[in-house]
Image: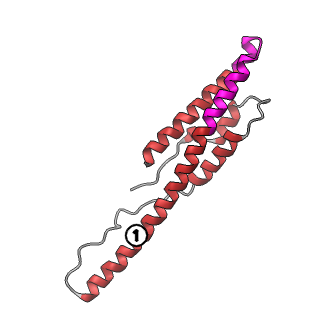
Amino acid sequence: MGATSLGSGLSSANWAKSKPADYKGQELDNALKACETAGGKTPVIPNNLIPKVPKLSIAEITSCITDLQSALTELQKALTMLQQIKTALLAVQGAAGKTAADLAKLAKGKDSDKDKEPYENAAGVANSISSAAGSALAGIK
């Protein structure tokens, strides 16, 4: 089993390119940075975790138990990391939704289409980030 990829859609650098210069909200920026940190710890689970069935001997059964305990430790580490990633993705999803709503509201307060455009575009990017976080969540549930 390989590592889970969070995808490039969940990049704080990509969001920074779309964020209007005068938008002061930091919630999405912070959530994306935390998600990038959590995603960088994604475990790789070896394919050979389960040992072969032992023969009926004390040495082979003891060796098998040791191997199973080691496999359990690896799986527990992977579960902990995936739970951290899930928490980070949920935070990104929530922050992106809030940010998109904030930006849409700010766009409505602008007089011209030219003034509204950066906010509407950024709201679309925030919605895309929320969707990417949802897709990544679906992949680890």
- The image position of residue 73, as x and y in percent, is 44, 70
Whether 44 is drawn above or below 11: the answer is: below
Give the quadrant of residue 11: top right
Foreground pick, 71 / 98: 98
- The image position of residue 17, as x and y in percent, is 69, 33
- The image position of residue 116, as x and y in percent, is 72, 17
* Amino acid type, label 1: Leu
Q: Quadrant of the N terminus?
A: bottom left
Residue neighbourhood size for the residue with mark 1, other residues' Cα within 10 Å, grouped as few (<14), some (14–19), many (≥20): some
Q: Which residues are magenta?
A: 95-117
User: Which residue corresponds to the image point at 44% horizontal and 67% vertical from the top-left?
Assistant: 74
Whether 87 is drawn above or below 13: the answer is: below
Which residue in the protein does label 1 denote?
Answer: 72
The furthest residue to the right: 22
- The image position of residue 46, as x and y in percent, is 39, 63
Foreground pick, 105 / 68: 105
Q: Secondary structure at mark 1?
A: helix
Whether 89 is drawn above or below 66: the answer is: above
The furthest residue to the top: 112
Q: Main secondary structure of the magenta part?
A: helix
User: Which residue corresponds to the image point at 64% horizontal and 33% vertical from the top-left?
Assistant: 98
User: Which residue corresponds to the image point at 65% horizontal and 45% vertical from the top-left?
Assistant: 31
Q: How is the image coloured?
A: secondary structure
Q: Give the side of residue 137 with respect to residue 125, left or right.
A: left
